[in-house]
Amino acid sequence: MELHISLDGHPTVVGAIYRGVLEAIRDGRIGAGRRLPPTRALALDLGVSRNSVASAYERLTAEGYLEARVGSGTYVRATSSRPTAVAPERPAGGLRPLAVWSRIPAGMPRAGSDPRFDFSIGMPDGELFPLATWRRLLSRELRVTNLDLGRYAAPSGVRPLRAAIARHVGASRAVRATAADVMVTNGAQQALDLLGRVMVGPGDVVAVEEPGYPPARRVFEACGARVIGVGVDGEGLMVDALPARARLVYVTPSHQFPLGTVMSLARRHALLRWARAAGALIVEDDYDSEYRFAARPLDPLQSLDPDGHTAYVGSFSKTLSPALRLGFLIAPRALREALQVARSLTDWHGNPTTELALARFIEDGELAAHLRRTARVYAARRAALLDSLSGWPQGRLASIPSVAGLHVAARLGAGAHAPTVAARAQAAGIAVRPISHFAADPATPDGLVLGYGVIDVERIGPGLERLAGLIDDSIGS
Ligand SMILES: Cc1ncc(COP(=O)(O)O)c(C=O)c1O
């Protein structure tokens, strides 16, 4: 173990070592049971005599902080440390982050731990992750010599993955892109962050859907933008209500988050006309449309847009795992250079080994096979959920039509208060979110959002039955 000890500020070397080790124990930097560096090694490291280190250790041993084990070394005793804060909570001089960071809540909280009936949204089933294949591809890519481990890689990601993604979205979504147009990102979230950096400055207006995806709203708020929520009806974002001065508009046209509506073709054209007139960027987040359960998908905005006003964002968080942090951005060419600079300033680039493994996964047809397999599982869950709801009395909970993704939203009948139902459900072991959880405007019509990404098919019926009871109680109360 390396142990940093400062010899400054103490009249004797032994005293400085004694104080340094004691502070490290008290702060919890070296925990109970950890072995200290051998006296010879620490003496060499500090440029002092071995005797000085041994004397400091002896004093700490006599005081009960350390124990010497014959033939093994010197260890921190179990009872000696109670970690205290490493840095003072309120440093002198009023150091604090910008106000925006205290207004933005941390992440999207999970709806309780291990609920019995888990209708959480935003997550795929971890059990379906193709672990054996992924392990094989990762170890293969780690061994091959094309990994240039002595250097930084390209900010846009490894070329084989950019090419594989361009082919994949070209074939499955009619997105027009070559490898050069694709930037591999740490999930969709990094793509949004980069677009915010290059397009949005303090005070700029950004439009987002209302209700909508909170991490998108927040990332633009963090850029200092004035973020305005624009309502969503049965045809998607209400383009007529867009603020005239918006520089960027964020939308989820294939499966509106969280309502599930598909943006109509007429609305898509209206949005593109608006963006052209306003000189604004459309950010098209196509986060989960690989899971499609009916009807041919409409063309993405990106492929309907001849003028280069649309940035297309995709993610492997639903199809593979959110923990991999793999997504991509296909931005208008006018933004490409700025995005590459922004990416290098953020984190240089992603992990080339993971990126090469994903490229192989796509090119070998594994992604297509995985999507077919998992779509069958999710289709069965979705059918179970919609079947159950359709048998319910009118007005209790009516699902909003949707054709893709891993969740459905539903409107509660009059008299039921969605946040109360969701809170009571959570207490009863049913994880479900109210639509209002994703809304910034309290006047947004409420309801519930039910995910089927993680719940087993046979738990859906019983879970919904219990939920029905809670809704009926809430209408009665
Ligand atoms: C609307 C939306 N966009 C993007 C994502 C994926 O984000 P990321 O790729 O950063 O995990 C999600 C995941 O839940 C989502 O709901």
Image (spheres, helix red, strand yellow):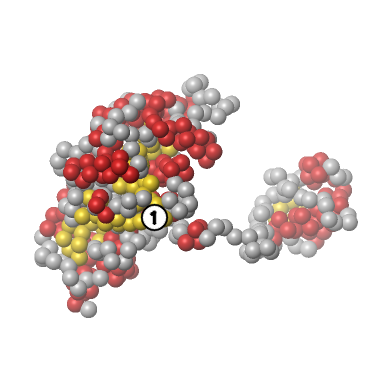
Quadrant position of the N terminus in the picture: top right
- The answer to which quarter of the image holds residue 313 is top left
Q: Quadrant for the C terminus, please.
A: bottom left
Q: Residue at x 29, y 52 (%)?
A: 242
Which is more toward the observer, 15 or 213? 213
Name the side, left or right, on which 15 lies relative to 395: right
Q: Which residue position is annotated with label 1?
A: 227
In the image, 34 versus 381, the foreground residue is 381
**Residue at horizontal 39%, vertical 55%?**
227
* Residue 420 in view, yes or no: yes
Q: Position of residue 347 (x, y in %)?
A: 53, 39
For disc 1, the neighbor class at 10 Å (few under 14, some 14 to 19, many from 20) is many
In this rendering, would 125 be left or right of 467? right
**Image-quadrant location for residue 458:** bottom left
- Determine whether the beta carbon of the residue marked 1 sits less than 8 angstroms from the nearest atom of ligand 1: no
Depth order, front residue of 197/286: 197
Whether residue 258 is visible to the viewer of this picture, yes or no, is no
Is 345 above or below relative to 101? Answer: above
Disc 1 residue type (three-letter): Val
- In depth, the one of 152 and 7 nearer the eye is 152
- Indicate the position of residue 30 as horizontal and vertical percent values: 67, 53
Q: Is residue 338 above or below residue 252?
A: above
Q: Residue at x 35, y 41 (%)?
A: 279
Give the quarter of the image for residue 386.
bottom left
Residue 297 spot, x, y in % from top left? 19, 39
Left or right of 408, for residue 163: right
Secondary structure category for the residue under label 1: strand
Q: Is residue 146 above or below residue 268?
A: above
Residue at x-position 40% and y-position 58%: 109
Outermost residue on the top side: it is: 145
Count the marks: 1
